[in-house]
Structures are given as structure tokens and as C-alpha cells.
Amino acid sequence: MSPPVEPPVDPLAGPRFALRGRVVTMNGRHDVIDDGVVYINQGVIDQVGPAGAEPPAGHEQTAVTRSGGTIYPGLIELHNHLPYNVLPLWQVPENYPNRSEWGGAQNPDYRRLVTGPMRVLGEDAALMPAVVRYVEAKALVNGTTTSQGIALFSNTGARRMYRGVVRNVEATDDPALPEAATRIADVEAANAEKFLARLNQGRRLLLHLAEGRDTDSRNHFLALNFRDEEWAITENLIGIHCAGLLAEDFPVLAAHGGSMVWSPLSNLLLYGRTADIAAARGAGVLLALGSDWSVSGSKGLLGELKAARLASEAAGGVFTDRDLVDMATRNPAVMLRWEAALGSLRAGARADVIVVSQAGGDAYTTLIDARDSDLSLVVIAGNARYGTRALMDDLAPVTELETGVRGLPAGRALHLRQASADPVVGALTLAEAARRLTQALADLPGTADRARAAPAVARAAGPQWRLALDEIEPTGAELRPRLPVLRAGRAVPSGPVIGGADAELEEGPLALPALRLDGLTATKDATYRRTLGGEMNLPPGFAAALEELLT
């Protein structure tokens, strides 16, 4: 018997409404309607057109809500390690050559500040749901409507993806939104033929590639050339970071159909440099943006757009503001094969929409210049999820709104209730999630002691879920290829062994420090901005320029 088919994570069941404002369609012509209306019903856009046009059938009596700003498609993020976004920005202590030098058990500072705390939070029955609620809401209030997912393991050996408010590229259960993968089996990561066979299965793979600035980083890419001129690259490979590639590598990536996710702030913080974006553009590589994680990155795509503009300017003005907005809307939709359903505002597309309060000047510059306090509405699948109290009162059930959450801009409301809420979170409010996490992180040593002293949960009690944290422990799945490089006819390892340097080792109890819960938004988080200003690897003036854009 076939297993039951899960319903779509985001069912087409939202209310009927219309939004008026400047409409930035991000369609193939990049049409901008200075005074337009977006008509929405059942989670789908019915019509986009000038304010004076006749409404579509069924909307004759639909009240038009004035947004007071500029309307864009929801922001699509193709790289994030969401569970870690409760942790504060790391004051990076040195300039690292590659990912293996700063991550994993060989770096005590990383274990103490990142993996150790996440183990404590991710395995606690009360704290794990708080992590899930907090990081999803954090993505939402920074304009992200689609991101990578949160994986869960249970004590019964089951694994599944969290089903929440923000769309998940790895779990949609919707044929119009084919699911991507962000992990591959160890054997596929280490064997070139098996890796290529996996790519040829037709599913997009979002994998870390060439993470760093040295030869070892580039070798992870060169290892894809596993036999003469044969490359384990197809249109299904979406390489994350690619900071170690040389200019001559990008034409190879493009010629074989590969694309790339760019995380400039994280790259600069860790390595003092980012990908050669001029070479990538010159080769025609399709790019999207990812904010990576709060440990060494932006709070969300609104912040990463600003970092990307600064990095582009430093490289000689590689991208226009329109190009950058493409990287958070159209481009990722194309890369995922979602362009018929998301990434632009047009009839028939899914109703994922954001609004910023300004409506003057260049339409694309307006979005990149927007602070998180300028974000006035976020709609996912036709449901208003976050925005000003005035707009949310019009578009969401007033009795289900959450207001007054510390760390949000004034006058904002959240709508996190779902008819088919994931049981991991259920009715947990953002305020309660933040309270639990703030208390646990402030007393992290005590939280860890209590966790060690707690009796193990018996299997008879039913499934008990915990976070499946990337790279903390070997799970049989990899986030990057580990193929050997061909050297003089023989294979030479291109990076750490599977389950080795990246895997957290058991070394006994760890003395954990008290930590601060990372703030939801940059404008309300002075500590984040202060830490950013002290980062040693950022180019001169970069931190000050970014802080000015953020606040």
C-alpha cells in the first residue's frame, strides 16, 4: 500500500482581498505599475493591473486596501541554517582560509559558542519548539517568505521536515513547487559517479561548494571534474558560496548549467573576501541570495540585500539594484523551477507578497534601502502573516494576532496561527518562545546541567522530537560533495573525511557561557550592530556603511 500523500504545506485557502500601491511585478519585462492593485483569493493572485482597471470576476465587491507603499513578490532565500538563528553574531577571531578551519570540534571557541549551545537547545522538549517558532518568525519579519527548512529527528528514528508558516524549499507537497534537497547520502558525497547519478535524478540539489579563499576550497569544485573533461555538474546543482572559485571556473559552472547562491556578508566575516561576482556575472551564472545564519551573517534577506549592494560596489559596481532584487525573487524561483508559481506578481501565481512603506524613487532601490522598520506587510499563500496593525486588522483575524513582541518595530502584529499547525509548535506564541530562549541562554550552564540530569524519555512515551542540527553529529547525510581531486591520474581527497572534521566530537561536558538571544531585527538590536562594527575581516568602511543602511 502506498503511504498517504501529505496535503500541501501551504494550501490554497486564503481569504479574498486586494492591495493597492506601487506594484513591482518582477515579471519578464520588469513592469512597475505606479498605482496598481493586486487581487488575491484562495492563496492565488487573480489579477495585477492599474488601479483604474476593472476588477476580475468574483472581485466586484472586494474592498481594496491601500497599502501605502510598494508591493513586491515575497523574498525567496536559498541558503540558511535556520535553527542557529537564535544565536548572536560571532566576533570572528581570525581570518580563516576555509570552512574546515573554523567549523567543527577542532575549534573550541566554535564548539563553546555555537554547537554546544545548540545541542542544549535542540534536544530539550520545551526549548526545541521555542527555537523553531523564534527562527521562523525572525525570517518572516525580515521579509523572507521562502527559506530552507528545519529538519527534525525523533527518538524512534523518524526524520521529517518542520511544516510551518514560511515556505520550505525542501518540503512543499505541491507539484507546482518541486522540492529541492539540501543533503545527500555520504556515499553520494564521496563517489563521483553516484553523485552525478543523483544529480541526473532531476531534483535540484542545494549544496555548499568551495567555501573559503584557499586552494583547498577550490579543490572541492575541481573535484567535480572526475574523468577527463567530464564534470559532475548539471542544471540540478546549485552551489552555495563558491567563494574559492577562480575566474576561469565560472564559465565551467555556467556551461554545465550550474547556478550559485551568494552569501556575501558571511563570506566577508569569515574569510575577508567573497565570490568573484564579476567573473560569475560575466560567465552568465544565475545567482540567488542567502543570508546563511545569524552566527556569521545577516538577520534576513532585507539585510543581505544591503550587504550584496556594498560588495557589488566594492567590486566595481557589478550589479544594479534591480539585479540584486532579482536575486531574492525571480532568480531563485527560476533556479528551483518555481517561476510559474512564485518569484513574480502576476495572475495565477501564488500570493506571496511583501510591502514596504515607501513608494517614491527607484522601485528596486526602495526595497534595498528599506529598513526592517519599513516592512509594513508580509503575505504567504494569501494569508497576512506580519505587518502594521492597521493592515493586519484589515487582512487577518484580529483575535489571532500577536502584538507587543519585544524586538519588533512599534505597531506591528503577527499572525502565526495555522489551521494545520505543526504539532511541534502548535499554539506557542513568539513572546513565549522568546521568553524561554532568553532565560535558557542567559543561564546556559544551568540549562545544560539540568538537561544532563534529566532522565531519558522512554520510547513508550511516544515520539519525542529534537532538532537535526547540521554538522553537529554524523547522520549519514552531507551538505557538500567530498569528491577526490584527480592528480596525475590518481584520486586525492579534496577535503575532510566524511563525518570527520565537521562532526562534533564527544569530549565530555563543556563549560558553556551565558549567551544573549539574537534580536529579531537589526534596527532593534544595538548589540548586533556593535559586534558587526568590531568584525576584523570586513573591508574598511564596510561595517559602518552597512549599519547606516540597516538603521
Image: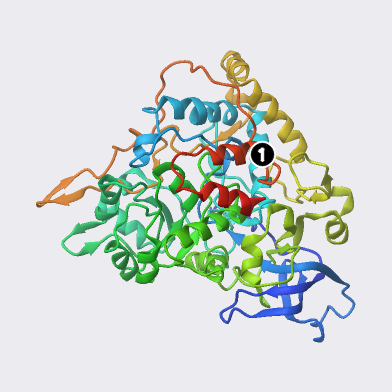
Q: Position of residue 514 (x, y in %)?
A: 60, 22
Q: Position of residue 314 (x, y in %)?
A: 45, 59
Q: Position of residue 386 (x, y in %)?
A: 76, 54
Residue 29 is left or right of residue 213, and the answer is: right
Query: In the depicted view, which residue is nearer to us: 182 or 330?
Result: 330
Does 70 sit above or below residue 198? below
Total numbered labels placed on residues in the image:
1
Q: In the rendered view, how is the structure colored?
A: rainbow
Circle 1: element type = helix
Asked if residue 34 can be seen in this view, the reply is yes
Q: To which residue does mark 1 refer? A: 526
Residue drawn at x 87%, y 61% as measured from the top left: 394
Query: In the depicted view, which residue is nearer to us: 526 or 480?
Result: 526
Looking at this view, name the residue that lies furthest to the top. Answer: 453
Residue drawn at x 51%, y 17% as measured from the top left: 511
Asked if residue 167 can be seen in this view, the reply is no
Query: In the depicted view, which residue is nearer to us: 262 or 414?
Result: 262
Residue 518 is left or right of residue 96, and the answer is: right
Does 220 sit above or below residue 370? above
Does 172 sit above or below residue 472? below
Residue drawn at x 25%, y 62% as measured from the top left: 231
Q: Identify the amino acid type marked 1.
A: Ala
Q: Quadrant of residue 275?
A: bottom left
Looking at this view, name the residue that lies furthest to the left. Answer: 488
Q: Position of residue 523 (x, y in %)?
A: 69, 46
Residue density around tag 1, few if under 14, some if 14–19, many if 20 or more, within 10 Å = few
Looking at this view, name the residue that lies furthest to the front. Answer: 541
